[in-house]
Image (spheres, grey):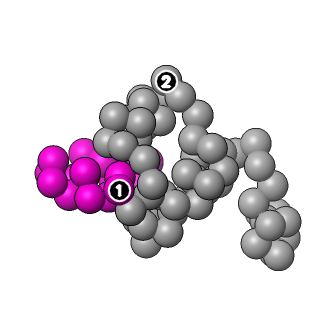
Amino acid sequence: MTLHEYLKSLDKAALDAFAGRCGTSAGQLKQVAYGNRRAGAALAVGIERESAGSVTCEQLRADIDWAYLRGSKAA
């Protein structure tokens, strides 16, 4: 699932709560979802954690070697 799809599944209150748990604003999440801004590594981790893995760090930041950080082999 993409971040855009995930955010579309949330109503305004849930989106605001999700953003707060990720340590950012709903506006910032929308900017990332639409490709206008890049998620920082910490935000990518927060999004994956708070979406229960529905949106992964790899989807958000393919330029980071997440497999190394996770201690696993690259796919």
- Residue 1 position in % (x across, y down): 42, 54
Q: Amino acid at mark 2?
A: Asn
Q: Could you tell me which residue is drawn at 32 percent across and 42 percent down?
A: 26
Q: Could you tell me which residue is drawn at 80 percent across and 67 percent down?
A: 69
Residue 4 visible at all: no
Specify the label residue 36 is tagged with: 2
Q: Is residue 37 above or below residue 11?
A: above
Q: Quadrant of residue 50?
A: bottom left
Disc 2: CA contacts within 10 A as few (<14), some (14-19) or many (>=20)? few
Using the image as rendered, state which of residue 75 and residue 60 is in the foreground. Answer: 60
For the C terminus, the quadrant is bottom right
Spatial CA span between label 2 and label 1: 20 Å
What main secondary structure does the magenta stretch of the protein show?
helix
Left or right of residue 11, residue 30 in this image: right
Helix or strand or loop: what does disc 2 sit on? loop
Left or right of residue 17, residue 2 in this image: right
Q: Amino acid at mark 1?
A: Gly
Q: Quadrant of residue 67?
A: bottom right
Q: Residue furthest bottom?
A: 71
- The first of marks 2 and 1 along the sequence is 1
Q: Could you tell me which residue is drawn at 57 percent across and 41 percent down?
A: 39
- Residue 70 position in % (x across, y down): 76, 72
Specify the label residue 71 is tagged with: none
Q: Could you tell me which residue is drawn at 77 percent across and 49 percent down?
A: 64
- Residue 29 position in % (x across, y down): 40, 41
Left or right of residue 63, residue 37 in this image: left
Q: Is residue 71 above or below residue 34?
A: below
Q: Which residues are magenta?
A: 1-20
Specify the label residue 20 is tagged with: 1
Helix or strand or loop: what does disc 1 sit on? helix
Disc 1: CA contacts within 10 A as few (<14), some (14-19) or many (>=20)? few
